[in-house]
Image: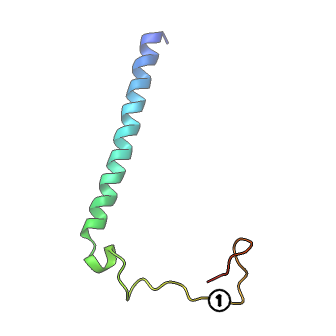
Amino acid sequence: MNIKTRRRLAIFVTCAATLALYGTAAYRVEQARQLPREYASCNFERCIPPQCDPERPALRRGQSSC
């Protein structure tokens, strides 16, 4: 393969990868858009933070687990 062929192949692969990433992102946005609003966003009934567990050790030194 000469340099022109390699350059064109590199450009083609770069464009294909960019289009694949864009297509994946567009697909995920479309799937999220089709969900009902209460599933797409986090409201109080569906998104309750985990309860404080005093038995669980802290993640970092000097922090509580709550």
In the rendered image, the quadrant that contains the C terminus is bottom right
Residue at image point 73% right, 81% down: 57
Choose top left, top right, bottom left or bottom right for residue 27.
bottom left
Residue type (three-letter) at the residue carrying disc 1: Asp
* x and y, in percent, of residue 35 in the image: 28, 73
Choose top left, top right, bottom left or bottom right for residue 8.
top left
* x and y, in percent, of residue 12 in the image: 38, 27
For the rendered model, the colour scheme is rainbow
Q: Is residue 37 left or right of residue 12?
A: left
**Above or below for 1 versus 50:** above
**Above or below for 54 versus 28:** below
Q: How packed is label 1: few (under 14 Cα within 10 Å), some, or many (20 or more)? A: few
Residue at image point 32% right, 73% down: 40
Choose top left, top right, bottom left or bottom right for residue 46.
bottom left
* x and y, in percent, of residue 15 in the image: 36, 32
Residue at image point 67% right, 81% down: 64
Q: Is residue 50 left or right of residue 30?
A: right
* x and y, in percent, of residue 61 in the image: 74, 72
Q: Is residue 50 left or right of residue 44?
A: right
Q: Residue furthest top?
A: 2
Tally of marks: 1
**Above or below for 52 versus 32:** below
**Above or below for 26 versus 47:** above
Quick one: 45 or 20, which is closer to the camera? Answer: 45
Residue at image point 25% right, 69% down: 34
Q: Secondary structure at mark 1?
A: loop
Q: Is residue 57 left or right of residue 51?
A: right
Residue marked by disc 1: 53
